[in-house]
Image: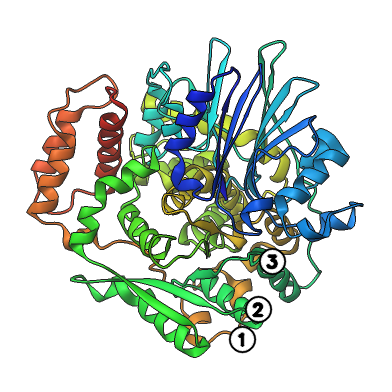
Amino acid sequence: MCGINGFNFTDKTGLEKMNSRLSHRGPDFVGLFVDKEVSLGHLLLSIREVREISKQPYAENPEWILLFNGQIYNTTQLKRDLTGLDPAKTDLDTYILYKTIEKYGWKFIEKIHGMFAICLYNTKEKILRLYRDPSGQKLLYYYFKDNKLIFSSEIKSIMVYSIDKSIDPLAIQVAQNIGYIPGEKTIFQHISKIAPSQCITFNLKEEKLEKTFYESMADNYFPKDFTSAFHQLVEEHLQSKQRVALNLSGGLDSSILLHEMAKNGHEVHTYTTLFTDCSDKYNIDANLAGRLSKDYGTDHKKIIITKNSYRDLFIDAYKTIEEPNFNVSLPVYLQTAIEEGTQHDKNRVIISGNGGDEIFGGYSHYYKSAVIGQWIKLLSPWIFNAIKNHRNGTHFNFRDFDERWLFFRRLHSESDSPSFRKTMDYLKDSITPLVSMYGENNDDVYQIMLRERFLWMPGENFIQTDKIYMSQSAELRSPMSYHPFRIYSDKNLKKRDYTDKHSNKLFLRKLYDGKLPDYITKRNDKTGWRSPIADWYDNDFKNLFLEIIGDRKSMDIVDWKAVRRHIESTDTWPGKQVHLYLSLAILAEEYNINI
């Protein structure tokens, strides 16, 4: 896990400044490659091998220069296809990745599986390519204008240069409607984030940039039975020479990971969050996690989240994300990462259950989607749309899976407004290439899960998990989001395996019945790591919110006076959409821009 930077011109001093901005992502080594065409930088967080053989940019062969951030999990399979390997380096995924590149050239991307952001430069062809993994767990941003290409793992590093910081109004509107920006857009017109399964090709001779999508071959990757598949999944994600810890929420996904880690014979260190001065409902999961940790004999730690610690980390948490975000739990995640990370408990690898809901049917709206599908078949789409929209005061075409997903996920309620329709068009453009690759199944649950995987997870979930944990020089791994495991699960599960009106994750509960305790497998309510901001909210929070908004002048995009009035008008928590505007205000201050 590392940080990468670069651009298509020569400037060693500027590259060093970019690397310095990302020092938290790679405290072990800083590497540079500079020639007449490009400048490439890498920061190393050593996990799977010692620093001496892990240094990047990696260039055993002068034809290929590699910058790699993330993990390649299928190294065992890749090694079977390679010859003449150095035995001292075969545990290093960067080395195996490089040897795969040497053998297959640009087609290497079809062979590898993992979470990654990759920059690969061919010195003979003068072609530079940037890749993001199919699940979108690792981030890569790029600025492109006037044939100037600057890329980085984080936006703050790109800001080293005097760039055009013009705001993208559509991106802001999308965030206002759903709480974050999925797809390729950021709040800046000329800074984009690479989408899952996307490749950006820059031809240095022609100064031409091209965007394409690639497919990863994942057939027959896992054994036929799910029990063996889970064992392989967890075993691959435990590849590390550093201590591996687990975020244990008390939910089904993290409990399964605990069970598989213990069965694997791995020494398990678990963490959960415990909130103070709030309703007991916010600690249901923490109490279950504590009970489960005792049953499995883990080294368990409760991270105590107080109203004051949440408030103290509020601005830093939203600043760390670098993008607008409505997630009210970001300060909780930041405190968790701080206590787990290299500066405190010295963990470099954290395992998380992120992604289980999106392959096994974990949310209540998945069942609602199944019901909508049944009613559409019974009444006809036109009649159902008329009835549903009349009752909800909306204007959705529920036969369209994109619109159905947006109905479940929207923050903004004016579904007939021009802003909302533009958001809908943007989401369709963002999801279409990925649905065309993976969305042949028209099951009502699967299609909504697919949109969660390619819009919400890479656009919100993985942005905050990557940046928050890497701010503490720690790597978060999400086995349930592993692309080959998604493909495997999709091929082996049907609608009946996901959800019904009584429960969710029906297949998982059946699979682990008798393996996990009943208080896990037979529990249907879902809390998760949600902060009790509604219980904590008081005048101190109100004043903090008003201070963040300040006296900003209302623009065409954001009516700051209306946001301020909304906060002033109530002494209770003003709702999660306010957090979206607070994040925008924090970013405007950080980037010195007007929104």
Of the pair 314 and 27, the residue shown nearer to us: 27
Q: Label 3: which residue?
A: 233
Q: Identify the mark at residue 511; answer none if there is no mark.
A: 2
| Separation of marks 3 and 2 at Cα, in angstroms | 16 Å
Q: Is residue 208 left or right of residue 122?
A: left
Q: Which badge, 3 or 2, is on the more N-terminal residue? A: 3
Tag 1 and tag 2, C-beta contact below 8 Å: yes
| Separation of marks 1 and 3 at Cα, in angstroms | 17 Å
Tag 3 and tag 2, C-beta contact below 8 Å: no
Colour scheme of the picture: rainbow
Q: Is residue 107 left or right of residue 593?
A: right
Say few, some or many: other residues with alpha carbon within 10 Å of mark 1 (under 14 / 14 to 19 / 20 or more). Answer: few
Of the pair 400 and 568, the residue shown nearer to us: 568
Q: In this picture, is 484 found above or below 529?
A: above
Give the residue displayed 53% in from the left and 65% down from the top.
353
Give coordinates of residue 183: x percent, y percent: 53, 35
Give the residue displayed 45% in from the left and 88% down from the top.
294
Say few, some or many: other residues with alpha carbon within 10 Å of mark 2 (under 14 / 14 to 19 / 20 or more). Answer: few
Q: Label 1: which residue?
A: 515
Which amino acid type is marked by label 1? Lys
Q: Which badge, 1 or 3, is on the more N-terminal residue? A: 3
Q: Is residue 42 left or right of residue 440?
A: left
What quarter of the picture does the C terminus occupy? top left
Which amino acid type is marked by label 3? Leu
Q: Identify the mark at residue 300; answer none if there is no mark.
A: none
Looking at the rendered image, the disc whose residue lies closer to the viewer, 1 or 2, is 1
Write down the quadrant of residue 508 in the picture. Answer: bottom right
Give coordinates of residue 134: x percent, y percent: 66, 45
Residue 299 appearing in the image: yes
Which amino acid type is marked by label 2? Leu
